[in-house]
Each structure stands twice: as C-alpha cells, then as structure tokens.
Amino acid sequence: MSRNRIFRKISPKKNAPCILLLALSLIVTAHVQADFEDGLFASHKGDYVSAFREFRSLAEKGHTKAQLHLGIMYEMGLGVKQDYPEAAKWYQKAAIQGDREAQKKIVEMRKKGLSSASLPPVPDNFKGNITDPQTQHDLGVMYFKGVGVQKNYATAYRWFYMAANQGHARAQNNLAVMLSKGNGVRQNNQEAYVWFLKAAEQGLADSQFNLGILLSHGKAQGMPRHFILAYMWFEIAAQNGILESRNSQVRLAKQMQDKQIDEAKLQARKWLSKHSPRK
C-alpha cells in the first residue's frame, strides 16, 4: 500500500459541513451552560424568580441539572409555590437520566411521605439508573419495611445486594440478615457469614455481633461451631458499643476453657489494634 493512500490529504471542501456542525454544537453547548450558570448565579443571589425562569427553560429541554434544581425549587418553595408532586416529577426526570442527587431526592421524599411518584424505572437485572450505594441501601430499607412502598422482601434483597457489592457495610449486614432468616430468599447461613464478615471487617459493630451469634450457635445455624472466633467477635462488638455482646460472652464462656477465652481475647486485641472502631 502506498504512503499516499494511508496519509490522504483532507479536503477542506468535503469536510466543511462536519466542521460547521461541530462549531454549531459547541456554540449551543456553551450557550446552554451559560444559561444554567445564570440560573445558579441568580439563585445564589436570592433572585429565585430569575433562577426559576432559567432552570425551567432548560429543564423542559432535558437539561439534567436544571431538572434537579427545578425540583429543589418546587420542593422548597423558592421562587414558586411549594409543590411536592411537581418537585418529584422533575427529580424523576433527572433521576432517569442518572443524576445521583435526584435519585436520592426521590427516595427521601418517598421516605418522608411527601410524594407518591413512582421510583425511576430499573431493568430486571437491577443494573440501571440508580447506581449510588447509599440510595440503593435506602431503597432496600424502604422495601424491607414497607415505607412509602409496598413491602417486598425480594426487591429489598436485590437493592441491598447491589449496594453490598459496592462495599456498603450496612447493606452487607442487612443482606446477611435476610440470608440468615430466609427473608425473600432461601436461607443460607454460609453466605450470610461471608457478608457479615465483609461488613465486620469494615468495622460495623452489628455485623461483628452477628458473626458471634452465627459462630456460637453452630449446627443449629447451619454453620460449624467455633467458640474462640465467636467469643472474639463478641469482644470486638462489645468494644465497639454493642453491650448485648457481654451477655453473649457470659453464656458462651460456660462452654469454653479458660485458655480458649484467653486466646479469643488476644485475637480480639490484635484485631482492634489494626482497625478503627466504627459503630
């Protein structure tokens, strides 16, 4: 192949339409951004009427952040009469486009009973628009308790699972609790142990206590008994503020030798020296 065929000269005439479209696109983008910043500036000055006008115009054209700010204005009654359903409508439009703050706002409004608007649609595989782990966890709590939505353990489990996979400690604990009790999923204490352990290693005291429960009950929980580890986790949980762990230690100690208790306390001290307490 010749050099000329690889490095063809670009014809200005042939590419002029593309260059023109690109230039126009940049101009439009810059104009939209300028309008949005005008809205922010007006809002910061307390000129909510002007801010509302700017945000409304952009929001109707699909501008995500403008939709979010418009929702805030309707929710707070800034420059417009307070209107929760209207706020939820604009939050949902932004949320569907993947705005995390809008997703949180919808969940917060549902939890407070301020809106009955549906949550942003999520595909069957639950890998859709809501990606913030805290929002996923909050949705799990809502479905688990039936707050603002119909109680649904299976849906709660899936939300907790999404957040847990992103390292959310409280979601990991809640997921493990559901697995250990068989809420919305087949009971599986081995898998529950794995999730409790993940959260416990992040310093979540509730999970540390729950590990002690699983390990001390043994076969009754579908887990092999391990008194030393159980006592160790009870000790760690107690150090992190779970007073109930002390009662569990007293009961467990009746089945242990002194040297086992000493070993458990030693392991707990080693663990605590490497990890910062988190209640």
Image (cartoon, rainbow, N blue to C red):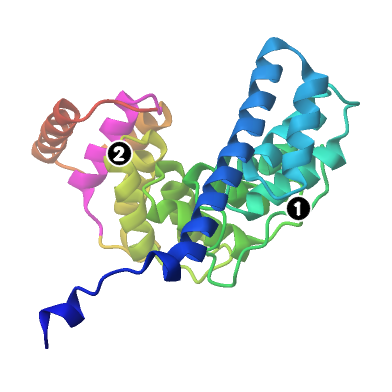
Residue holding disc 1: 149
Query: What secondary structure characterizes most of the magenta part?
Result: helix
Q: Which image quarter: residue 193?
A: bottom left
Q: Quadrant of the N terminus?
A: bottom left
Q: Is residue 232 magenta?
A: yes
Q: Residue at x 52, y 64 (%)?
A: 17
Q: Residue furthest top?
A: 45
What amino acid does circle 2 point to?
A: Gln
Q: Which image quarter: residue 234?
A: top left
Q: Quadrant of the C terminus?
A: top left
From the viewer's perspective, tell me whether residue 272 is left or right of residue 64.
left
Q: Earlier in the sequence, mark 2 or mark 1?
A: 1
Numbered range of the magenta stretch? 225-242
Pointer 1: residues within 10 angstroms few (<14), some, or many (20+)? Answer: some
Q: Residue furthest right?
A: 81
Q: Tag 2, which secondary structure?
A: loop
Residue holding disc 2: 202
**Is residue 7 placed above or below 71 in the rendered structure?**
below
Residue 67: image location, x then y, percent: 71, 41
